[in-house]
Amino acid sequence: MHRLLLVESSPSLRCGLEKLLLRHGFAVVALPADATALAAFDQELSRGLATLILGWSNMPAAVAEAFVQRLGKPDCAPLALVVLAADPARVGAPLSGRAYTRVLRLQRPSEVPRLVRSLIAQVASDGRPDAESPSALKVLLVDDSRTSRTKYQRLLRNHGYAVVACEHAEAALERVQAERFDLAVIDYFMPGMNGAALCRALRELPATRDMTLAVLTGSYEEGLISDCLEAGASECMFKNESDELVVARVDSMARLCERERRLKDEGQRLELILSSVGDGVYGVDRHGRITFVNPAALRLLQCTHEDELVGLAAHERIHHTDERGRPVPAETCFLQQAYELGDSLSNWETVFWRADGEMLNVECTVRPQHQGDECVGVVVAFRDIAERKRHEAETQWQLRHDHLTKLHNRRHFEYMLEQEIFRLRRSSEQSALLFIDLDRFKQINDTAGHAAGDALLASIGRKLKSRSRQSDLVARLAGDEFAVLLRNVDDGSVLALAEKFRAILDEGHFSHGGREFEVSGSLGIARLSRHTLSPAYAMNCADAACHIAKREGRNRIHVFDLGGDAGALATLQQSWSERLKIALAAGNFALQFQPIFELRRLPEGGEEVTAEALHGHEVFLRLDDVDTLLAPRAFLSQAERFELMPALDGWVLDRVALMLAHRERPVASRFHLNVATASLLDAGYLARLTALLREGAFAPGQLCLEIKESELAGQLQALQPILNELHQLGVRLLLDEYGRGLGGLGHLRGLPLSAVKLDGSLVQSLASDEVGVLMVRAMTDLAHAMKAVVIAPLIEDSTVLQRLRSAGVDYAQGFVLGEPRTSWQELQAH
């Protein structure tokens, strides 16, 4: 093992380099750059030091000068030297011009192991004193006859061999301790130790154990030849043979030596490659027994030495059990079958088991290895995908849950309700669907603000979850609407369970900002059985029951009964469906416009906005409900249920285009329109949008479509060509709620996104969470790397605004900067 001395002032760099070199098989002594390093250098030289590595950039001048002086002495001449410098030009000529020296830029420390091996090989090659050329094979000639030594030394040198001659066995044994030889030609009859005895002695020494040996003799005695071959000689040559025959036999042995050297060099090269790759690699024979492992495999499997794996069955040692802890028989294990059949596997995900008993999620690639037409084994490359699996699990969680309450969201709840109804059709069991609607939530939201409303919803979500059974499914549908799927309940128990949920809302007051609010809720129940028509029908029944509970005085429970409540169900279904259709036909909707400002153009105070900082406006849709304008959360879920989103998004699109058409001069402001993926996939909406763009209703870059990340993730394949075409037509595409689902730009980076908008709850949390700024900064850096700008919504105070500015966010909107305006003239003024 090569000995290295590493001298570096920086503890972190010294530690990192030491680990890197140890991982590549070197014996390392790492010291700081001070006077003790010079003393240690002299000690290490006496112990066979092969390489010195100097960290030049931060080395004290006195220590650096002392090393320069010391390295100039003769005993340091064959020493390999690597100098790490931030600026290689600043390393003086005494070092940069020295033999066996490489100066490496400090930013590339990963190159150090390769350079060290290259320098050591060069030192070893140049250290052959009698070599005619660096590539000449080195022959040790041992013969007590001066005449024979001179003859064969001249003969072999004339044929390109580097020859070192010794007159007796003891001199030869001493010489091989200091030099490396490829081949030895040994006279048999010598005083003291004869040729056979010398062969045996050479076979005992580690340095010469594999050397090719030949005995030279003038005798043809059978016992002599047998003695030499048993002692380890590969060839017996006779002194009365012609010189051509002697050279031919030496050439034959030399070719074998060259082949072995090339095989050894190739093996070392492959070992270096295996050591440098980050993936784990191991080989197995056709029976599945491990033949080799690389350092990365040892590290990933928590093994300290290859003996812990090599020679053992890979199935028994690594992949004997599945991710649930169930044993996997060898005859059903895909990897074991690949070993035995010589099959290939690509991107195969499975689990390996580490030496400490912990499970490791891996992705494998299996490739067979052939000799001629025969498969002799396979090579397996694997990587740790635990982080990717965690990321995928987190993404799936985000897609199925409501970010505010951590309950399941509407989409997942409707899917699970559908599965439950399918199950009940094959069973005699009964279940129930429970709708919960908070009473007077709008009053709390309007009085105390959105932050108070969100805190209330989060608190109720936690309480509902805590009162639910393990088999129940609790979800937040939208706004202040919750739902619970009660599995396997009869008529008696469903009322008792519903009462527990009602009591949660009525058991205490809600406090926020020093104010007390009364909280209650109305509950509607729909029974589920094998006769339930569909999930949508069940949802409508529970919704109708909830409306009846509200109508009868709030803070109560009503169980839907088809006999008595059919009219209410019909009214409800007709109510929202017809109400939205009538509003569309009559234009009973309104638009509001909230300004978006460029943060770097805003004054440090934040609240004093200027027209120069205006970037654009987000367009909000409101339902004109006679005496009030209803926010989208009051009716969008109903629009989705009755598949009216394309019509609503089309109304917004036409209205904005019409307002722009009535302007006498062009409007420079950008308009951000929220659009559902259902609308983008609707042929009518898409045709209308494309026509407006081609007609020039919007200037290039003036229209920005905001698409929710949670909706976009499930429709990537279908939406990709549509979004690409819209991008070509000049539409800006924005990813909304960025940060709610952590998949974000990772799986959407192929889309032509020009901007992302942070999730509102993440922005609002910054008021009390300074650590959240680090998360926002990381998300912003990622978006910038993908050439997308970052917009922060729902900013309600200047503290959050300043923290967003420090995180590098580009644009901002919220009440602290400007409330949504309903007047088109106010917008025109900007």
Image (tube, rainbow, N blue to C red):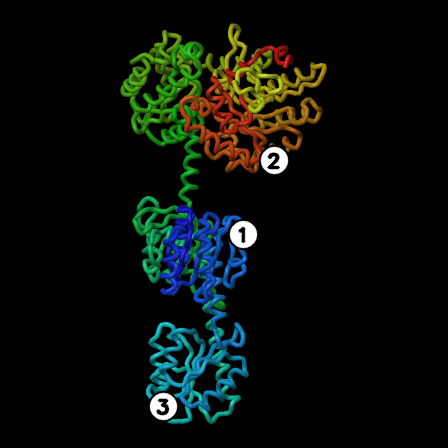
**Please, what is the three-letter code of the amino acid marked with disc 1?**
Pro
* Residue 745 pos. (x, y %): 52, 35
Q: Which mark is residue 88?
A: 1
Q: Is residue 325 visible?
A: yes
| Secondary structure found at label 3 | helix
**Please, what is the three-letter code of the amino acid marked with disc 2?**
Pro
* Residue 143 pos. (x, y %): 41, 87
The mark that comes first in sequence, 3 or 2, is: 3
Q: Residues within 10 Å of mark 3 (few under 14, many from 20)?
A: some
Compared across the picture, whether 690 is left or right of 245 comes to right
| Secondary structure found at label 2 | helix
Q: Which mark is residue 224?
A: 3
Q: CA distance from mark 1 to mark 2?
A: 51 Å
Disc 2 marks which residue? 721
Quadrant housing the N terminus: bottom left
Judging depth in this view, the residue of 554 and 93 nearest the camera is: 93
Compared across the picture, whether 383 is left or right of 650 comes to left
| Secondary structure found at label 1 | helix
Q: CA distance from mark 1 to mark 3?
A: 62 Å
**Please, what is the three-letter code of the amino acid marked with disc 3?**
Leu
